[in-house]
């Protein structure tokens, strides 16, 4: 479908972008171009749930970003994987399906974003779901994204849930229902042993539509601006530079790193930063790239005395072949699960009204996916506060889109983040001193028995903590007069007509949990707003 003009151009085929393009293509009168910098999602490891371990460091499908040396972590750099293929990060993540809690979105609304309260966004969460549990007041079953139950339940996971309950946390069966607090198995964006990426959910059903044109390996270099209006984009594919025109809108869905980078490269951002990098200033918008937020976690790791973990299931070639046969025949077993299988959402203090910390349990132990799993049975745990106060930024380092932007997480910058991280670590230690998990532990590998006081724990998480890969906030949503806001409540960039941003970057505050589900919801809601605004415009012109 060669053409140089479309109604809508969507930049980025990730968690939000694929949803937007798929939904807009439902109108046969509109022509949509979807641009993706990465390749097609043909690698089978993208679609096999356990494949995240293969794509975690694969530069073909992963931007493999690194932060700058972090000033509050002793100068360490932190790895930040981001998806680079159809489906974006939904194609390489751990598949956890967690939405956050009602107060997350009510805070968004209180910050001046009409239409983003929990009551407003719940219908979009339900709309995206094809939930294995069916539909009720919190869930849907007619949506495109398949939400399933864990395909591998083990005695190790069951023992962990039992110990967590014994340590004082109630059991639950739905983190996305009326209350998040509790311990349970995660639901995942997978069904019948297949990962449910947004590419499979929204683009595959739309592939027969002649009005949707998907171009992969197309690196968008600049948004074309005519005065204060976005009129198209310039993208690079192979040895060609291509200019395409948008009759109605350009929608940027590159994620928390790439979206602010593209705006800055196009002359939209902090004027001083743009001039320093040789970019002509089209609009001085100081918030572009600022307000970066992420969950920062401490890790605990143990060797156990039972052969109940994934480690021993993959130790030899015959065992791996058995796992492969189990997956092929049943679509279940370890190959059909995501990274973390069990979670706990808990309060750091009984005086709080809702959880402020998260624990993620992994039925394996490793020093890194590039190093393989340990040759003995083990498990790992990550814990983190929900709503960090530390703020970082994304800033271009060059006027070339090929140069990765500067990423500064500023992890543990704020004192409350340090206090809460230590509290979360201590709660995990309490669980691990409780039966039946206590009786399974043979050795504490991390942090070690010599780390027990608050100061020792803080030093440990400073020296070894890691990102949860939940970057957001760098094109924050808020009223035009709000400090550092980039888009309004309809995701329109302040001061530029015909330009929206829709992805995790618009979250004004980080949610209480993993961010992929909310990113998809943002895509669904954006598509509806685009449809409504353009239909209203057409009616007005008529």
Image (cartoon, grey):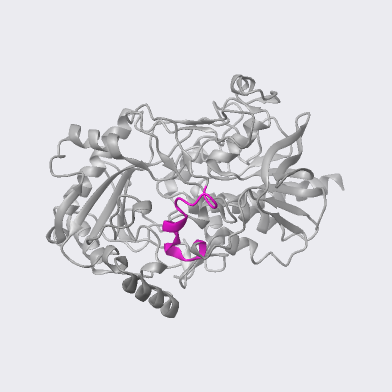
Magenta highlight range: 46-62
Q: On the image, which quarter does residue 302 sit in?
A: bottom left
Residue 23 in sight: yes
Q: Is 427 in front, or is 289?
A: 289
Residue 503 position, x and y percent, is 57, 45
Residue 436 position, x and y percent, is 15, 62
111, above or below 326, in the image: above
Q: Is 170 in front, or is 43?
A: 43
List the single residue furthest toward the right.
Answer: 542
41, above or below 75, in the image: below
Residue 344 is covered by the magenta coloring: no
Residue 301 position, x and y percent, is 24, 51
132, above or below 382, in the image: below
Residue 356 in sight: no
Q: Is 136 in front, or is 49?
A: 49
Residue 9 position, x and y percent, is 72, 47
Residue at 57% x, 65% y: name it: 143
Q: On the image, which quarter does residue 364 sit in?
A: bottom left
Left or right relative to 378: residue 236: right
List the single residue furthest toward the front.
Answer: 317
The number of callouts visible is 0
Residue at 34% x, 64% y: name it: 173
Q: Quadrant of the N terminus?
A: bottom right
Residue 47 is covered by the magenta coloring: yes
């Amino acid at each position: 479908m060669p053409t140089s003009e479309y109604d809508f151009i969507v930049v980025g085929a990730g968690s939000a972008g694929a949803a937007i393009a798929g939904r807009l293509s439902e109108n046969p009168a509109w022509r949509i171009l979807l641009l993706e910098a990465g390749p097609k999602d043909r690698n089978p490891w993208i679609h096999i749930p356990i494949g995240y371990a293969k794509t975690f460091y694969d530069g073909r499908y992963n931007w493999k970003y690194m932060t700058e040396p972090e000033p509050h972590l002793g100068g360490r750099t932190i790895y930040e994987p981001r998806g680079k293929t159809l489906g974006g990060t939904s194609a390489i993540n751990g598949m956890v399906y967690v939405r956050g809690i009602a107060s997350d979105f009510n805070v968004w609304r209180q910050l001046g974003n009409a239409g983003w309260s929990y009551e407003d966004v719940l219908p979009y969460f339900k709309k995206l779901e094809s939930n294995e549990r069916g539909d009720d007041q919190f869930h849907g079953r007619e949506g495109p994204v398949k939400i399933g139950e864990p395909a591998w339940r083990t005695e190790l996971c069951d023992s962990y849930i039992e110990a967590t309950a014994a340590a004082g946390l109630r059991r639950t069966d739905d983190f996305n229902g009326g209350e998040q607090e509790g311990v349970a198995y995660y639901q995942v964006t997978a069904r019948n042993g297949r990962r449910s990426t947004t590419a499979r959910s929204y683009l595959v059903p739309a592939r027969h539509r002649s009005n949707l044109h998907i171009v992969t390996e197309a690196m968008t270099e600049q948004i074309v601006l005519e005065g204060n209006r976005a009129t198209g984009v310039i993208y690079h594919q192979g040895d060609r530079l291509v200019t395409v025109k948008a009759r109605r809108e350009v929608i940027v869905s590159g994620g928390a790193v790439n979206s602010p980078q593209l705006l800055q490269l196009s002359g939209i951002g902090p004027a001083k930063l743009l001039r320093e990098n040789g970019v002509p200033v089209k609009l001085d918008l100081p918030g572009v790239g600022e307000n970066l937020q992420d969950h920062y976690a401490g890790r605990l790791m143990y060797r156990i005395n039972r052969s109940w973990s994934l480690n021993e299931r993959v130790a030899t070639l015959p065992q791996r072949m058995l796992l492969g046969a189990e997956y092929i025949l049943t679509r279940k077993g370890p190959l059909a699960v995501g990274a973390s299988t069990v979670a706990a959402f808990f309060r750091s203090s009984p005086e709080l009204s809702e959880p402020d910390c998260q624990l993620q349990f992994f039925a394996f132990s490793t020093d890194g996916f590039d190093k393989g799993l340990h040759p003995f049975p083990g498990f790992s745990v990550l814990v983190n506060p929900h709503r960090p106060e530390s703020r970082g930024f994304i800033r271009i380092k060059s006027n070339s889109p090929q140069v990765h932007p500067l990423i500064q997480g500023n992890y543990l910058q704020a004192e409350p983040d340090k206090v809460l991280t230590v509290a979360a670590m201590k709660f995990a230690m309490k669980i691990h001193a409780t039966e039946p998990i206590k009786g399974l532990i043979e050795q504490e590998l991390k942090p070690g028995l010599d780390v027990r006081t608050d100061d020792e724990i803080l030093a440990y998480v400073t020296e070894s903590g890691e990102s949860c890969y939940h970057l957001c906030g760098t094109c924050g949503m808020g009223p035009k007069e709000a400090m550092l806001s980039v888009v309004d409540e309809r995701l329109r960039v302040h001061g530029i007509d015909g330009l929206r941003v829709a992805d995790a970057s618009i979250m004004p505050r980080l949610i209480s949990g993993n961010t992929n589900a909310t990113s998809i919801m943002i895509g669904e809601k954006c598509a509806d707003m685009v449809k409504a605004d353009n239909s209203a415009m057409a009616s007005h012109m008529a």
